[in-house]
Structure formats: C-alpha cells, structure tokens
Image (spheres, grey):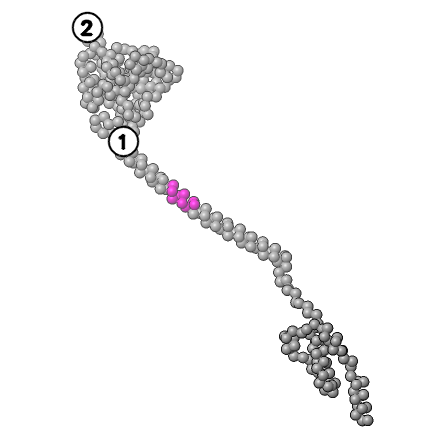
Amino acid sequence: MFIKRRESRLESSLPSLPSLSSLSSLPSMSRASLSSPSPPLPPIITALSDEDEDLFVRKSAIAAHTHTHTPIKRLQFASSEWKSMDEKSNTKSRSKNRDDESASESSAISSYENKMKELSSQLSQVIQQMSREDNLVKDGGDLRQDRARIIVIRNGSAEQTSDGAYEFVSTITLIEDDGKRILVDTGLGTDINGRRSILEGLLTHGITPPAIDIVITTHGHPDHFGTHDYPDAIHFSSFYIHHKARFNLSSLFDRDWHTLAKNVALFKASGHTSNDIAVFVDNEQKMGRTVISGKFI
C-alpha cells in the first residue's frame, strides 16, 4: 500500500513527456552538437527510470541545440565619405607623383638639349675653323677662298707726247672669287707690247687665256676693249652680255645691279661714256670693299 501511494504521487508530479513517435520526427543531431556539454539535469530526474531519463535528456538536448542561429553582421568600418576622401587623397598623390615625374623628365630633357646645343656650337666652330684653314689663299692662283682677291696685271697711265697726242694705257685687273676668274678691261688691241705684258702677267699667276671665265669692258674706248682673245669667256659690255656669237641684254638694262660671283657685282656708273659700268668687289683680302671703275681702283 505504501509503495503504491508513493508511485502514484510520483507519477502525478512528473511532467508529461513526449511519445517516441513524436521524437522520431525531430531532425537528427550532428555528432558535434551531441558532443557539446549538456545543461545540468533538474533534481526530479534522479527519480526517473533509466528509459525515461534517457528520453528526457534527449529532449532537453534537442531543445538546447535547435534554437535559431543569427550570424554576426560584418561591421562597415569605412563609410562612403571616408572612401571618397581616400579616393581624393589617392588621386592627389598620383597627380603629385605624375607632376614630379613630369618635372624630372622636363629637367632631364632641358639638360640634354643644352648639352646638345653646346656640342653643336663647338662643332660649328671647329667646322668654321677647318673651312678657314682649307680656304687659305695659296700661291699659284688657288681659288679655294672665302674672300675675293684682286690682282693688278698692269697699271694704267696717260701720257702726252711731244706732238700733243696722248698715250693711254688702261689698267688691267684680275679678280678671283667663288671659283671664277674675272678680267676687267683688256687694253689696246694694236699695242703689241701691251698684249705681251698681259699674257706675261697672267702666266705669272699660272693663268692662261682659256682659263678666264668673264671679261668686263667698263666703257667703249679702244684702250679698254682691244684684246679680247678669250674665246671661252662670257663678255659684259655696257648693257650687253655675249658669249661667242650669242648676244643678250644683261640685267643692267632693267636695273642698276648685276651679280657675277659671291663677292663681285656690276653696277651702272657715270664716267667717260653714258653707258659706263663699274665693278664692285666686297670682302677683298687686302682692301676690303673695292670699286674698279675705268682707269681707277
């Protein structure tokens, strides 16, 4: 009697447990969840049977491990404003780096250009010096020269004879410039001695008549145009220019200047006749700028 009352009292005080069929519908637990420590058992479990105790433990464990898991959200440590500031800072840094690189490159280019200019200037000076040395005037009528050269073949004169007549001897001048040999006036054609003196004067400088390139007659008096034995030369007389049998008008017909060589030119000049021409020589070796006009230099 005593034992029966005790068992009925215990049964009335126990909570209702789920049936085995309901437990079987629960999701299966993983090995990791079962291996975690279980919460402490209530004191009433000590009075349960082994089978009931096992069911109670399983129910408590399932309840403890089937709660909803809420993952922790990742914190946003950089706001959009901070990102914008970082981008601006990076942009400025990159721009500064580019400016520094550009400035460095410009400085290097400028230094290189200055060095090249200096080297070019030095090279130009060397070339000019070599050219001057190469163009030094040498004996024997060397034409490799930058400056013009005037050679007086015969000095002119005017003498009165006892019978009141005059003997005129024109000045005969040779000009060398720019690879050309220019003969100014040729003397009296009937003066045998004068013709011989011209040939001797040219030969003194290693020049023969066929080597004359240009013959100039300053005016039409016979003592200036008599000896024209220069078959390969181009002849200038007043406004006219002729070579062998061909005649033409020179540029002196339209204007006052006609260039013959680098430092030599013809120009109109008043003199013995209305159609006189004179020779202007620039950069002559000894006399600088020189004018050959008729009988005068």
User: Where 286 sits versus 36, above or below?
Assistant: above
Residue under label 2? 163
Residue in the foreground of this view, choosing between 12 and 120 = 12
Quadrant location of the N terminus?
A: bottom right
Residue drawn where x is 45% and y is 46% of the image: 106
Point out the frontmost of discs 2 and 1. 1
Identify the secondary structure beneath mark 1. loop
Residue drawn where x is 71% and y is 85% of the image: 50
Identify the secondary structure beneath mark 2. loop
In the picture, measured across the screen, residue 42 lies left or right of residue 259, that is: right
Mark yes or no: residue 238 visible.
Answer: no
Residue drawn where x is 50% and y is 50% of the image: 98
User: Which range is magenta?
Assistant: 109-117
Q: Main secondary structure of the magenta part?
A: helix
Quadrant location of the C terminus?
A: top left
Q: Would residue 113 be counted in the magenta stretch?
A: yes
Residue under label 1? 135
